[in-house]
Image (cartoon, rainbow, N blue to C red):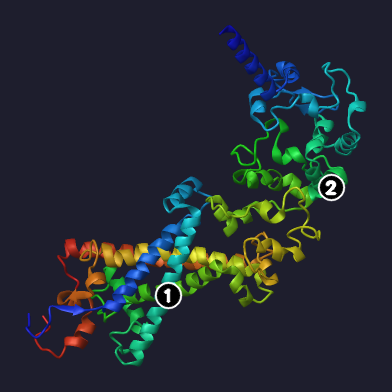
Amino acid sequence: MNNELPKEYLRFNVIERIQHVILFITFLLLTFTGWALKYPEITIEHQRWWISMWGGAKTAGLIHRIAGITMLIDFVWHVIYLGYMLSTGKMKVRKDTTIVPLPKDISDLIKNMLYFLGIGKEKPQFGRFSYIHKFDYWAVFWGMGIIGASGFFLAFPVQVSFLFPSWSVNWMWEVISIMHSDEALLAIVFILFWHFYNEHLKWDKFPMSTTWITGKITMEQMRHEHPLEYELEFGSKKGANK
Amino acid sequence: MRRFLVIVFLWLFLLCLTYSASAETFTCLACHSAMKGKIRTEGGTVIDVNVDSERYATSVHGGFDCLMCHKQFSLNPHEPAKIGNIPKNIAALAGKIAHKAKVDPVALAACTECHDSVYNMVQESVHGKNVIEKKQSDGALCTDCHGSPHYITPKSTATSLVNKKNIVKTCGECHENENLAKKYDFGTHILDRYYESFHGKKYVIGHPNAPTCVNCHSYHDIRMWDDPKSPVAWDNRTATCGKCHKGATKKFVTAITHKPIGKHNPIPYWFEKGLIVLLLSVFAFIVGHVVIEAFAEIRDRVFRKGGGH
């Protein structure tokens, strides 16, 4: 190992880590307290038991609203933070480090699938964010828009009713309820499969990657998982490559 | 000592007389609590003339004499009924609802003796008018919602049919009935749509503030929505919804329709279908991706010895 190279690389700064912690705590609270409303007509005994674990329907509803608003505030904070970082030049949009989806992500996906299936010989080379990370990240944005907005409408129905034209109120609330409930299911399944597999269950990550606490990854990981970013950051330092 | 015992026994005896049904009730129940099966009346209706004396004793009417309601019968059992002894208002009401009462129209009318203001409301309601004005025998009166008067328990008890826990099911007895729905042109989907709504979901999981049918539609004086006195009539809705949703506006109160999702309400229907397609495609993609990646990972670790990076 070259002495010029640090042993670890700071992937997420402290603000990003706090935002993530708030996000997952509120996400779990929302999931747990909201779940009883998802299929009450099918498994009513379980749902009644489950809701009693959260202090009854009234308390669970209060927790759900508080967690929801906290999550929305966290989201707004994140967007403002991004705006600040980009406008001050502390964060730059570069091909190999950006979270913005690029055509390369599609070809990476195809390449990866072919590799998994044993057809392709090589894995794709990822930058700071692979298409897997990008999907994970933008799914949250999508969820914030759809579930966050519909949840806000449902929490304050009288106050937001002026937003909807009168010809739409007949079906608008149906649409909002469906939106909130179905998209929440999508978010839960997405986190359970996509995020849990990629950040917890993978061979070298199990039981979880500690990056969410320390913000750091090892140079070894950096080289293997983010070769393009590694090249960009440390490529000039010769001897860095194996 | 003996005198004391006599006094105690006398007192207990008096207590029994005061707190339980009278001797006369015991006489009726001697037979009418031991009858099995049902009997067919002259009119051809099959009726149950048995009364569960234990349940009767614990009901709110448990202390009553039978004849307090069954006014046309005399102390001599099964002597032909005498209309003459019945107060006029009850006799008149009994005449109006005779086609509805299977067993004893006078007894069904006798509720008004104590519950007159409520009974007047019911007569003005859509349920009452259906029986009295439209002469329908399947319309709802007291016993259809409250059950047999012999077994009525306070609204706060779990056995009461109008207890909050049971009221929606009680309404559903008729409002989910296919034949009645066809006859009176109401949809059987109402309860399903209620259960699917946030109000219904909250009710099912036991939220104390969740509204049931009666919180919006009222009960004894329930009316059609196009009756201006109905709480869900267009002009009264802001007040009705406003009981929970403070500041409810005209725009807000149109939100609840119980409309079936489908042909008549295509936007939510297709929106939900679209969302399901989206959900299933995302599920298929992520689950498929995770599964083949996991297999590839095992293949690399076990058979290719950490290759692939």
Q: Quadrant of the C terminus of chain B?
A: bottom left
Residue pictured at 66% horizontal, 73% vertical:
A168
Q: Which residue is mark 2?
A: B129
Residue pictured at 85% horizontal, 20% vertical:
B74
State which mark lies toward you, 1 or 2: 1
Task: Please identify the residue farthest to the top as the structure is shown.
Answer: B2
Viewed as shown, does residue B298 lie left or right of B268? Answer: left
Q: Which residue is mark 1?
A: A73
Task: Please identify the residue farthest to the right as the structure is shown.
Answer: B84
Q: Nearest the camera: B209 or B46?
A: B209
Name the kind of residue labelled 2 in the image. Lys
Q: From this viewpoint, is residue A31 visible? A: yes
Specify few, some or many for label 1: CA neighbours under 10 Å numbering under 14, 14-19, or 20 or more.
Answer: some
Name the kind of residue labelled 1 in the image. Ile
Chain for numbered disc 2: B
- Residue B255 place in picture, x, y as percent: 65, 66
Chain for numbered disc 1: A
Specify few, some or many for label 2: CA neighbours under 10 Å numbering under 14, 14-19, or 20 or more.
Answer: some
Question: Which disc is residue B293 wearing?
Answer: none
- Residue B101 place in picture, x, y as percent: 81, 34
Q: Secondary structure at mark 1?
A: helix
Q: Same chain for the residues at labels 1 and 2, yes or no?
A: no
A43 above or below A81?
above
Q: Quadrant of the N terminus of chain B?
A: top right
- Residue B183 place in picture, x, y as percent: 79, 48
Whether the residues at callouts 1 and 2 have beta carbons within 8 Å, the answer is no
Q: Secondary structure at mark 2?
A: helix
Viewed as shown, does residue A146 lie left or right of B157? Answer: left
B309 above or below B49?
below
Q: From this viewpoint, is residue B270 visible? A: no
